């Protein structure tokens, strides 16, 4: 009945293949915890995903919620550290290696090559969010206006998120 | 270990400042944490220049694991070693976990309220715009035609064609390194 061991092991393995972040391994988490172990139902999984999206914080939050649901606060701790521990140690080592030689020519080249990929992927995730979440014209306008405001001004984006929420709460956006 | 190339007026953040900085990123981060990481680290606290931040985020994105989770480890390590990494990561995770658990316990009571649901739809529409606007802001610095070509390719492959991320990275990252190197050798990088 001890779920902490398998939970830690599953998360630790996913940690090292999650290139691109926690959202990449969500399908496999669903396969393991809903399908193989049967620790959560489909509806539980969908609810936890919705809450992780609605709450502020990094996407990896879904992992903590799954852990909480599976085994309480110990589960939340074990799942979070399982997902972030191995990749965190790797990141620590790479940070040390990366900055050992200072501003070397190869580091500058790699940086010039990876920087645009990073920006392209951020834009792609914005497009994915918009396509998944914007179900009507008003939602599309909110997305467009926010994008222009963020790109051209230094206004605190919390105001824009609040304005979007207000427009939605007034009933001008369909809830999906 | 070299210090990051920061604006000259920026002091090296303390362990506690790292905790607070990532706490600030975390509690603001609706719809993805990367835009808020940029806003806090570059615009508000000035721990990083725009270019140094992009370098840090790129490294964290190519490594496995949560991107901004990695970024907390990376930034903490660079400024304050292991204690800095632990402080930044704790700052990033603690408050969102508590907030999310609170929302979970309230979810059953409020999920049927239409205003809550449509309000959240409005927030997520704005959050999508925040992510797109941040990408535009990061790109709008005149970095040369090759830079834009690589960015647009990554965007189209993952955002447009919906190809899975891992194969795209495995092919595009080495290809970009070779192209950048070739263009640098032939001296036609920026035009």
Image: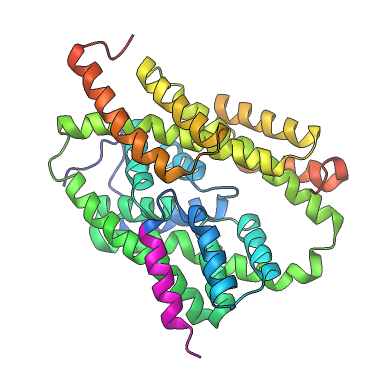
Q: Tell me which corner region of the image, top left, top right, bottom left or bottom right, holds residue A84.
A: bottom left
Q: Is B188 located above or below residue B60 in the figure?
A: above
Q: Tell me which corner region of the image, top left, top right, bottom left or bottom right, holds residue B44.
A: top left
Residue drawn at x 73%, y 39% as measured from the top left: A134
Q: Is residue A162 left or right of residue A151?
A: right
Q: Residue furthest front?
A: A36
Q: Is residue B104 magenta?
A: no
Which stretch did the figure color magenta?
A1-16
Q: Viewer-proximal residue, A112 or B98?
A: A112
Residue B2 appears at what percent x and percent y?
Answer: 17, 43
Q: Is residue B98 left or right of residue A14?
A: right
Q: Residue furthest top?
A: B191
Q: Is B164 located above or below residue B18 in the figure?
A: above
User: Does residue B47 appear in this view?
Assistant: no
Q: How many marks?
A: 0
Residue drawn at x 31%, y 13% as measured from the top left: B190
Q: Is A118 located above or below residue B142 in the figure?
A: below
Residue drawn at x 68%, y 34% as measured from the top left: A143
Query: Which colour style is shown?
Result: rainbow
Q: Is residue A3 magenta?
A: yes
Residue drawn at x 58%, y 31% as measured from the top left: A150
Residue B70 appears at what percent x and percent y?
Answer: 37, 53
Residue B58 appears at what percent x and percent y?
Answer: 35, 40
Q: Residue furthest bottom?
A: A1
Residue B105 appears at what percent x and percent y?
Answer: 69, 73
Which SS type dominates the magenta stretch?
Answer: helix
Q: Viewer-proximal residue, A55 or B4?
A: A55
Q: Tell me which corner region of the image, top left, top right, bottom left or bottom right, holds residue B110.
A: bottom right
The image quadrant where one finds the C terminus of chain B is top left
């Amino acid at each position: 009945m001890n779920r902490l061991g398998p939970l830690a092991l599953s998360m630790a393995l996913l940690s090292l293949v999650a290139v691109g972040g926690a959202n990449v391994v969500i399908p496999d988490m669903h396969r393991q915890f809903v399908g193989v172990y049967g620790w959560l139902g489909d509806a539980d999984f969908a609810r936890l995903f919705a809450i992780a999206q609605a709450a502020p914080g990094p996407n990896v939050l879904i992992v903590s919620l799954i852990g909480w649901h599976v085994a309480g606060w110990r589960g939340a701790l074990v799942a979070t550290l399982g997902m972030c521990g191995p990749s965190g140690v790797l990141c620590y080592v790479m940070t040390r290696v990366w900055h050992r030689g200072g501003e070397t020519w190869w580091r500058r080249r790699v940086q010039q090559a990876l920087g645009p990929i990073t920006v392209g992927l951020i834009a792609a995730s914005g497009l994915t969010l918009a396509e998944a979440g914007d179900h009507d014209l008003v939602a599309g306008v909110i997305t467009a206006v926010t994008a222009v405001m963020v790109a051209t001004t230094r206004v605190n984006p919390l105001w824009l998120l609040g304005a979007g929420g207000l427009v939605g709460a007034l009933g001008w956006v369909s809830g999906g | 270990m070299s210090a990051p190339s920061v604006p000259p007026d920026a002091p090296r953040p303390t362990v506690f400042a790292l905790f607070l900085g990532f706490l600030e990123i975390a509690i603001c981060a609706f719809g993805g944490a990367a835009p808020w990481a940029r806003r806090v680290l570059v615009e508000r606290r000035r721990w990083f220049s725009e270019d140094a931040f992009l370098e840090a985020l790129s490294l964290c994105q190519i490594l496995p694991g949560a991107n901004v989770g990695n970024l907390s480890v990376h930034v903490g390590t660079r400024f304050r070693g292991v204690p800095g990494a632990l402080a930044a990561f704790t700052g990033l995770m603690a408050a969102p976990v508590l907030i999310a658990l609170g929302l979970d316990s309230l979810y059953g009571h409020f999920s049927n309220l239409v205003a809550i649901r449509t309000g959240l739809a409005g927030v997520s529409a704005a959050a999508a715009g925040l992510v797109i606007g941040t990408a535009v802001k990061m790109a709008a610095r005149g970095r040369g035609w090759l830079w834009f070509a690589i960015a647009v390719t990554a965007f189209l492959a993952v955002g447009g064609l919906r190809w899975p991320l891992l194969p795209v990275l495995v092919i595009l990252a080495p290809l970009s390194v070779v192209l950048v190197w070739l263009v640098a050798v032939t001296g036609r990088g920026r035009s």
